[in-house]
Amino acid sequence: MPNFSTLFITAMPAEAEQVKKVLQENGFTLTAYSSNPACQIAEAQNIDSSSAINQPENPATIPANFAGELWSASNGKQHFLLATTGIGMVNAAKSLTQLLTHYPIRKVLCVGSAGGLRADTRVNQVVVGDIYRHSGADGTAFGYQPGQVPGQPAVFPASATLLALAKELLSTLSPAQSAQYRIGEMTSSDFFVTEKNVGNIRQLFPHALTADMETQAFAQVLHTYPHTEFLAIRGISDLCGEPDAQNISFHAELATVVYSAAQLAVPLAIKAENSL
């Protein structure tokens, strides 16, 4: 089996389609993975399924009961995985944990869409997350910081190595191109941030650029995998509330913004693999 050390992870199939498109444009061939019947039978019979996982005679498998979709991407020298998890924090955490226990993943790149949270964000901007917070957690009555899950750090930082590679790639763009990209804080929760609740979220997290429903869950899971690096890159498809300027578009096509995010994520993954 190829050494799948890099995973692209998305919430929705529509997001994965854009990552697939950019991978193909960079010379990768994609193969859809299928479920592993041996693992499923073992789990159904409540017996040890470890011998059924990653068997050489059936390498193109996914973990038993994996609810998302999974593809391999290969250019002959580099081998990546691309997965969908489903929307929401629980789906994100569950699916990523399954993949981490099934494959020797050492780099995880979240690619997707997000809502523009801060008033100065704009649709079609692409945000590279450097800090990830849970905007739906509130343990302040017991002395925790806003967004801090009890027993967990208040924030989860991106991989310094992957973030540095992203900055290096962005430095090669023209001023007009680089203006589309921003680096900053991301928030996640299990609720949509709209004009009804955006004011409170902006007040609690004044530096946060985006809101989504998975990124912090990925980061929290990977906090327990210290040898696996994480970076999220998301395109802003809509604004969560009133912007700080008039005549600003509130919506963009999801495919367009995720494609822009993937245009940074895929070269970054290639560069990271080449630097090993």
Image (cartoon, rainbow, N blue to C red):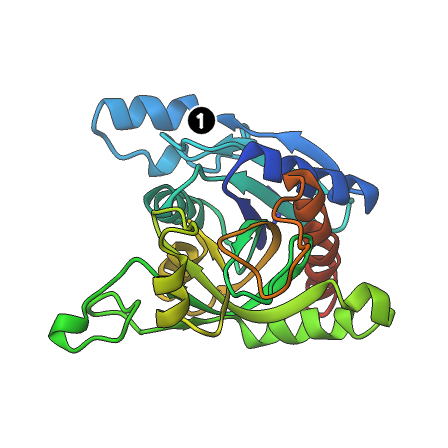
Which quarter of the figure is the C terminus placed in? bottom right
Disc 1 secondary structure class: loop
Front residue (pair 226, 38): 226
Farthest residue in the front direction?
Answer: 246
Q: Residue 213 location, x and y as percent?
A: 42, 49
Q: Position of residue 49 (x, y in %)?
A: 32, 33
Identity of the residue drawn at 72% across and 70% down: 275
- Based on the displayed image, in which of its 4 quarters is residue 5 positioned? bottom right
Within the image, what quadrant is residue 19 found in? top right
Query: In the rendered view of the protein, which quadrant contains the N terminus?
Result: top right
In the image, what residue occupies the spot 26% across and 75% down?
Answer: 145
The x, y position of residue 210, in whole percent, is 51, 60
Q: Nearer the viewer, residue 66 or 245?
A: 245
Q: Position of residue 66 (x, y in %)?
A: 40, 33
- State the residue position of label 1: 36
- Above or below, 94 against 32 in this view is below
Whether residue 263 is visible here, answered yes or no, is yes
**Residue 41 higher or lower than 107, as above or below:** above
Identify which amino acid the numbered label 1 is placed on. Answer: Asn
Residue drawn at x 66%, y 44% is: 252
